[in-house]
Amino acid sequence: MSADALRIALVGNPNCGKTALFNLLTGGRQKVANYAGVTIERKEGRFAAPSGRMLQILDLPGAYSFDAVSPDEQITRDVLEGNYPGEAPPDLIVCVADATNLRLHLRFVLEVRRLGRPVVLALNMMDAARRRGIEIDVPELSRRLGLPVVETIAVKRGGAQALVERVDGELPQAAPAQADDAASRSGLHAQVRELLAATVRMPRQTAELDDALDHWALHPVFGLAILAVVMFLVFQAVYAAGKPMTDLIGDGFAWLGAHVAAWLPAGPLQGLITDGIFTGLGTVLGFMPEILVLFFFILVLEESGYLPRAAFLLDRLMLSVGLTGRSFIPLLSSFACAIPGIMGTRSITDPRDRIATILVAPLMTCSARLPVYALLIGAFIPAHRVFGLFNLQGLVLFALYLAGILGAMLVGWVMKRIRRDQGDHALLMELPSYRLPKVRDVTIGLYERGMVFLKRLTGVILALTVLMWALSTFPAPPAGATGPAIDYSFAGHLGHWLAYPFAPIGFNWQMSLALIPAFAARETAVAALATVYAVGGDAGQLAPALASHVSLASALSLLVWFAYAPQCMSTLAVIRRETGEWRNVAISFGYQFVMAYAASFLVYQVASVLA
């Protein structure tokens, strides 16, 4: 980044289209990191303006007000005020507002203007405003605000042209900075009413299409049924659409590993590359299609505007189990990964509700569990059709996700009974308009999540896979040994020792050993099993090897274990950082271990009797 690049901060209320505008401006020229000292995501990108000037764009977390009640809003306020350590203040602030809902967004625009910094207002979603018959007198709004106002359509190619031309010119004059106090903030509502009366004409407060869809989507009975069907179909699609690609990738790595082995001389190097890298790492990579399918549907639901409605719909149910409707979106994010889900709890203003959501978020079935589920389901559950329509393997996958949800509800209910504050905190939120997800935004989201998975694959998972191969290979068996060579290795000794505490839940020593690297990253359980069985002499793919060595009862027990087991080290570290207490880390790890062991014990014992 050149030293003379113009630093531009994009700010706005949640659901204003700010991130879509950021994607439109920067495309793939983005980098994602965290703010110093916190786990709040920091997205930064750049692009060259028509004049050749380099523009550096910072996508700040969404905020409703500078009267910050969440860590996200505090970050936005501190960066804009120039008070965030290690973060230079922006040269220009672009305040993005939803043109269909200026009543809500203009208040924040007025707060930003009072900072005394150059500001441009981007009226986004102008195409949707025109379709609804909303008329905005842009020149008059600009005159009354005392700052430039441009129209944008973040979901349309070229929809930010007016904004680019404006920021590429001379910086607008900053309004005088004003004091921020409770009395002055109360006066903002009156200013918003005056601005709306003078510059905006709208035939109705909400869109007819939104009202028609919400009649069903927010219905207390039909709405819940629709939500259940949507989630059920998502999990069916994860297995139905992702499984063929997973099999293809697995076969490809097996073929490639066999050919590479033929080129290499027998010895440790051949074993490392074939049994360690191709078998271990390739097995995990094979499940990437199923993970991306899950990410795709979450992104589509998010971009469509349906997720906030699901949160609103589930508010009463979640209150009954000690959570809140605001918990829904962080918990849904936890289906991809518990870390952003836990970070997403910053939007929950009540500390009690936030802690409760953080502690139950790890029970949501994150994508790192998906390789384990897909492996065991593919090896032990036949691909039968139920009622001639539903895939039995998809039904089992849905049941595992449902088990995590029910477990979270149970834990929330227990926490509600044992804490002192028994009050409920109802959900108040603004519902965005429905919109069609844009291919560009979904593609960028999938790319970002896919790269995170690949970085983990080539980082911690690769390191743990190589370590597991070394532990499974060395030391070599002594002269005259009659048992399998792996039994004499470090992994063999450690696995046989771990098998004792896990024998009551049906785990053999290979399964017990795989739990250790899984604590660093869940996916490595699959890589560890693949490596251990490959070194032990079971050539070929992992699923047939498991089917020949593991009983159905043990496989079901392992599935249930991963539904409730303690989260990875990274998640526990985020819990510590977000809550500031090791006590919450100990509570999270402890109750999940007890739940996982108890549930696996019950499933194994019952399945052993029925088998």
Image (tube, helix red, strand yellow):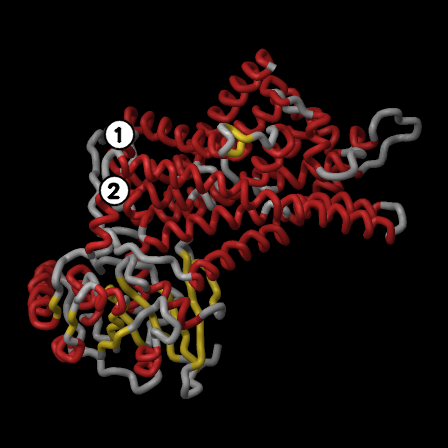
Residue 51 at x, y = what percent? 41, 88
Residue 107 at x, y = what percent? 16, 63
Question: What residue is rendered at 79% in x and 28% in y?
Answer: 487
State the image quarter where residue 216 is shown. top left
Residue 15 at x, y = what percent? 29, 58
Is residue 362 found left or right of 326 in the rendered image?
Answer: right
Secondary structure of residue under mark 1: helix
As drawn, the label of residue 432 is: none
As drawn, the label of residue 216 is: 2
Is residue 31 found left or right of 350 in the rendered image?
Answer: right
Question: What residue is rendered at 78% in x and 46% in y?
Answer: 274
Check disc 1 and report the residue beneath it. Answer: 320
Question: What residue is rendered at 51% in x and 48% in y?
Answer: 293
Residue 426 at x, y = what percent? 20, 39
Residue 566 showing in the rendered view: yes
Q: Is residue 501 above or below residue 269?
A: above
Amino acid on which disc 2 is placed? Trp
Which of these two is toward me, 214 or 170? 214
Question: What residue is rendered at 62% in x and 52% in y?
Answer: 459
